[in-house]
Image (cartoon, rainbow, N blue to C red):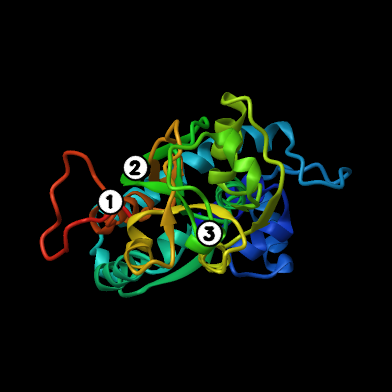
Amino acid sequence: MTLKQLETFYWVCRLGGFAAAAKHLHSTQSAVSMRIQDLEGSLGVPLFDRNQRSARLTAKGQDLIQYAERLMSVASEIRHRIGDPKVLSGTVRLGVTEFVAVTWLPALVAAINENYPDIALELDVDLTLTQLRKLQNGDLDVAVLPGPIEEPGLTNVPLGSVEFAWMASPKLGVPREKLTPRDLHAWPLLTLTHDSNLHKLMAKWFEASNATIRRANACNSIGVLAALTMAGLGVSYLPREHFARDISDGRLQLLDIEPKLPDLEYFAIFEKRQIQPLSQNIAQLAQQYSTFRKAGIGVPKGQRAPVAG
């Protein structure tokens, strides 16, 4: 019985199949099957019910998974606490939303490369709900998302908040006076798709004001939404400071709409039982290098003052 065999067993159980485990371990399905067979041979008992199509555990397999989780956790802790972090190797999969990718992600990647030069970083840019599903399915080690995500087993490390505001092109002719959600019926709405956190917040905001979204065009990119807004194709909800230059230059007009939506808070999220030893460290690096507004947190040395966008 080897640690490699137990790691393979852990991921087959965690991801629900041999193919998924092979993909996660950057191995082949035949190699994963061989490791499981060798593990069963060393223990003298079957761990999976071969009569089932899925990787269903036997009673002994269910007993073993608890030991495997503990051994993987201890092995990770040894590598993290005893070993030199600069010689840690492997792959860390980091998921972010588009807005993080176009703001402070390069600084975070540079910090990860400097602190862990032998770690291969896999970046994934997608919408919030999609990234959350990937995290829960074991396809990501850390996800930087709007939140908090209040799901059992997840740790949320706060990264700061971003102020969003309703905007339109001046050529759309939206009155420069106080408006309500119901007033937005007069213009097309430009929104992120249903897999975004902002879409859910906006839907609740309209519902609380007894208003509905009458006309809406959706896409999965804030940058595209901003371009469509500046082209005069509708009203959108965008990060205020990030588009401050476009506002001051007259390409975008801030709208005075009440009630206000709360600022969007961002978090670095990972599973509490995550066996990847760097997940918490990367979450803390994200907290350090995030340029989002942080209440009560000083500016890290060498960093510029945080902006809301």
Callout 1 environment at 10 Å: few (<14), some (14 to 19), or many (20+)?
Answer: many
| Residue 218 sits above or below residue 114 on the image | above
The x and y percentages for residue 76 are 38, 52
Q: Quadrant of residue 185?
A: top right
Determine which residue is flagged by label 2. 157
- Element assignment for label 1: helix
Q: Quadrant of residue 118?
A: bottom left
The x and y percentages for residue 279 are 38, 52
Marks 1,2: beta carbons within 8 A: yes
Callout 2 environment at 10 Å: few (<14), some (14 to 19), or many (20+)?
Answer: some
Determine which residue is flagged by label 1. 287
Q: Tag count in the figure?
A: 3
The x and y percentages for residue 211 are 64, 30
Distance from disc 1 to disc 3, alpha carbons, whole Å, reads 33 Å
The x and y percentages for residue 87 are 29, 70
Q: Nearer the viewer, mark 1 or mark 3?
A: 1
Q: Name the disc covering residue 2, or none.
A: none
Residue at position x 29%, y 55% in the image:
80
Residue nearest the observer in this picture, 53 or 100? 100
Considering every residue shown, the one lying at the far left of the view is 301
Marks 3,2: beta carbons within 8 A: no
Distance from disc 3 to disc 2, alpha carbons, whole Å, reads 31 Å
Name which residue type carries label 1: Gln
Name which residue type carries label 2: Val
Determine which residue is flagged by label 3. 4
- Element assignment for label 2: strand
Distance from disc 1 to disc 2, alpha carbons, whole Å, reads 7 Å
Name which residue type carries label 3: Lys
| Residue 23 sits above or below residue 153 on the image | below
- Element assignment for label 3: helix
Which badge, 3 or 2, is on the more N-terminal residue?
Answer: 3
